[in-house]
Amino acid sequence: MRSLSRKQILLLAAAVWLGGAVLIYAATGSSGKNEEFQPTGEFKLEEWLPLGFNRAVLYLLLAALLTIVTMVYIAKRMADRPNRVQTAVETVFVFMRDQIAGANLDRDMARKWFPFVGALFLFIWFNNMLGYIPLPVNDHEPISIGSLELPSFAIYAATANISIPLALSLMVWITYHIVGIRRQGLGKYFASWVPAGVEGFARGPIFLIEVISHFVRTISLSVRLFANILAGHLLILFMAGGLGVILGVAALGWFTLPAAVLFFLFEVGLVATLQAFIFATLTAIYLGGAVAAEH
């Protein structure tokens, strides 16, 4: 039998794709717009246990546990002849040391604050990556097994909840101010917010602008992480069938599913790591700026 060319394979795949959509539409038709399904409900947090324990807290605990256990496990098993796992961990270590801490802090600061910046990068990265692993956390559409109702599988990220990135941003914000005051003293630290050479009336407005910029940092840090992770999850949700559910056209999900796969791969392969890198890098920059004589 003659093998098919790449063009023929692509045409055959397109024909199967279109034919599948036609068959699904012929079998299901259109049920009209669904007013009950709300995509934002997928991110609603219901209290599972007292003291506010919900799925966001579960993801935070899992990310913290993975960060601690992974690094401690590898650190205790370092060998002269590293295996593949150790090589991968050492590559990540060198990347965090040289590209995040070392590139934005002087040698003494990088040595002192690398554990903080590195742990922040890994914690956010684990949180982001866990967000793309289906886990039984969807308590809005439970699975009934006899008299039991169990949560169904879904993807969710703690960093897609603004309170988590905001808490991390406030921690960074408070930390670098404390570091700057301890290094330079209260008066010199705030005086360093005005560039050298600025005299007279101009010092007041420039100082005020600098104050505003420092408060804006908490917003930029938190919203950047939150918005990118939330947008990615919403795109996957819509393309994986959410849009078809809202419009009541099941065949639409067949059309959009390939886009959902592409969005999923893009988020896992780039966005999850990139957002952790940006957050940790900006943290290092802010720490370095806080100890500089002039910001």
Image (cartoon, rainbow, N blue to C red):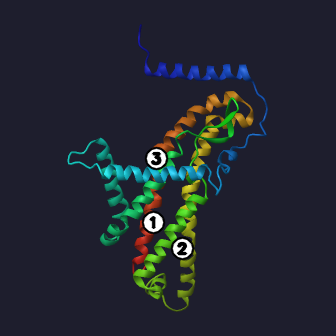
Q: CA distance from mark 3 to mark 1?
A: 20 Å
Secondary structure under the numbered disc 3 in the rendered image: helix
Residue 214 at x, y = what percent? Answer: 54, 73
Q: Which residue is mark 3?
A: 270
Does residue 284 sit above or below 186 in this rendering?
above
Q: Amino acid at mark 1?
A: Thr
Badge 2: residue crowd in 10 Å (few <14, some 14–19, many ≥20): some
CB atoms of marks 3 and 1 within 8 Å:
no
In the image, 50 versus 65, the foreground residue is 50
Q: Amino acid at mark 2?
A: His
What residue sits 36% from the left and 53% below the top? 72
Does residue 227 sit above or below 267 in this rendering?
below
Q: Quadrant of the N terminus?
A: top left
Does residue 16 sit above or below 41 in this rendering?
above
Q: Which of the 4 quarters of the picture holds residue 192?
A: bottom left
Q: Upstream in the sequence, badge 2 or badge 3?
A: 2
Q: CA distance from mark 2 to mark 1?
A: 13 Å
Eye-nearest disc, 3 or 1: 1
- Which mark, by number, is residue 283? 1
Q: Which residue is mark 2?
A: 214
